[in-house]
Image: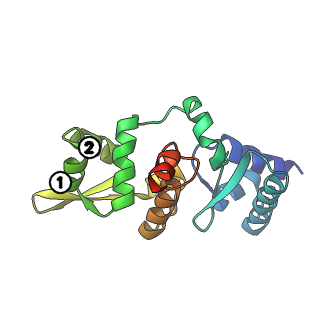
Amino acid sequence: MREEQLIEAALFVSTDPISITKLSEISGLEKNRVKEIVEELKKRYEERGSSIEIRKIGEERYIMQARDIFTAPLIDLVKPDVSQEVLKTLSLIALKQPITQAEIVKSRGYSAYSHIKELAMKDFILAEPKGRTKLLTTTKKFSDYFGFPREIEKIKKEMARLLDREDTPNYEEKKNTED
C-alpha cells in the first residue's frame, strides 16, 4: 500500500508528466507493477467522478491534473510561465504548424517577434530558418507541459476540439450567429 501512496504522491507533486521509469525508480517497484498501479489509480479517480484526473501522455508518461471542465474557473489560481498574449501566439503556432514566422507576424502583429523569441527560449517551439523567415513548430516540452500528444496532427485535432468546445466563452456568440 505504501508504494501505491508514494506513486500517487509523486503524480500529485510533479508539475510535468512523469514516466513509468521514474515512478519505478521512486517506488522501487518493477515497471509493469507501477503501470498497473497508475492505471488502477486512474480508474478510481474516474469511477468516483473526481475533479482530478490522471491523464496518460504518450506511451508511458502520466500527469495528475484538474479535469478540463474545471480549467476555466481555476485558471486564475495557476500562474503560467508566459503571458496571455504569448499564449495566444503559441496556440496559433500549435494550431497551424508548421507555420512561418512571417505568417504569425502578419496575423498577430510585430509583437509576435518577441513572443516567438520567448517561446523558443523556453523551448515551447522550434524556430528553424527557412529562407528569410523561420518555420515554427511545437516541441516535446510544449506537449509535455500542456498535456498534448506529441504528433502534430493529434495536437491540431486536440487544439481544434478545445477551441470549439461548448464551454468556451465564444460558444454563445457562435451559436447566436449560426441561428
In the displayed structure image, the side of residue 177 where residue 26 appears, left or right = right
- Where is residue 81? Give x, y as percent: 44, 36
Between marks 1 and 2 in the image, the one whose residue lies nearer the viewer: 1
Q: Can you see residue 123?
A: no
Which residue in the rendered view is the most extreme toward the right? 1
Q: From the viewer's perspective, is 51 left or right of 154?
A: right
Mark 1 element type? helix
Answer yes or no: is residue 33 visible.
yes
Q: Nearer the viewer, residue 139 or 47?
A: 47
In the picture of the structure, the residue carrying the numbered disc 2 is: 117
* Circle 2: element type: helix
Residue 154, position in %: x, y? 48, 67
Residue 76, compared with residue 39, is above or below; it is above
Q: Type of residue at label 2?
A: Lys
Please give the residue where the numbered disc 1 appears in the rendered image: 102
Q: Residue at x 71, y 58 (%)?
A: 24
Residue in view at x 33 percent, y 46 percent = 89
**Residue 123, image x and y in percent?**
37, 49
Residue 62: x percent and y percent? 64, 56
Number of residues whose C-alpha sits closer than 10 Å to that of mark 1, classed few (under 14), some (14–19) or many (20 or more): some
Question: Residue at the location (63% across, 44% down)?
Answer: 14
